[in-house]
Image (spheres, rainbow, N blue to C red):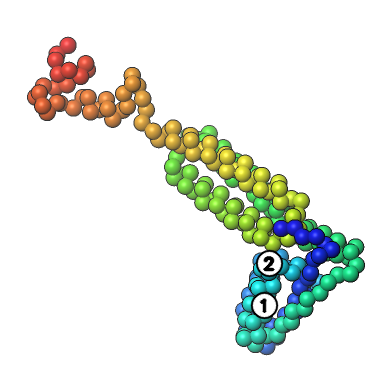
Amino acid sequence: MTESADEQGWLLISVSTAGAAPTLRVQVWRKLRSLGALYLQQSVCLLPEHEQTLRQVRRLLDRVRQQGGTGRLLHVAMTDQAEERQVIGEFNAARDAEYAEVLERLPAFRQELARERERGRATYAEVEESEADLERFRSWLAKIAARDYFAAPAGAAARAGVEEAAADLAAFEQDALAAESPATESGLTVPARVAAEVPATESGLPVTENGTGERA
């Protein structure tokens, strides 16, 4: 989600929830954080101007005003390229910190798979639980990527880390499949051997080990 600094427009957002319900302040903070807004000072933040960010900010300000708060949205341009590069660097630093948290938590996921494998607990139930954990990582990563407007450097490592975890889970699932499949012996599955020892109904003779109904 990159854009040239020379063409980048910006949204300057100012919000006040004074006099509104206390929950509104939390709602505003959560929404702006989810968008990856960079706070310049209390109640004033900055976002790159894109169709998505503009639409989301307008909706937020409408809600703020309806609930008794005030808000203002200004379209601005930075004429100092050095200053703009610094701002973009701050956006990237914030996203890198989020990607780093993903990378910090992935080893525990992979280590848990290794421990369960060592304990002989590669089961379908464990696969399902781990799939849910992996999906949470993917969802988390997607949310960060959605506000990664300038392709923060750590994004590639985080994506690779999640894919490595997915590969570990795929291997674990194969182990579970092998562990829960019927064991084979002499070309017969266990259920088939059990069936071979049940008396035959058509001949009325018990089926012996040679499976013919004739006595050995």
Residue at the image position 76 percent from the left and 51 percent from the top: 153
Q: Nearer the viewer, mark 2 or mark 1?
A: 1
State the quadrant of the N terminus: bottom right
Binning the other alpha carbons within 10 Å of mark 1 as few (below 14), some (14 to 19) or many (20 upward) gives: some
State the quadrant of the C terminus: top left
Amino acid type, callout 1: Arg
Q: Position of residue 32 (x, y in %)?
A: 69, 71
Vertical position of residue 155 compared to residue 165: above or below: below
Q: Which residue is mark 1?
A: 58
Residue at the image position 68 percent from the left and 67 percent from the top: 35
Work out whether residue 72 can be spotted.
yes
Binning the other alpha carbons within 10 Å of mark 2 as few (below 14), some (14 to 19) or many (20 upward) gives: many
Q: Is residue 19 left or right of residue 124?
A: right
The secondary structure type at the circle numbered 1 is helix
Amino acid type, callout 2: Leu
Q: Position of residue 133 (x, y in %)?
A: 54, 51
Residue at the image position 14 percent from the left and 26 percent from the top: 200
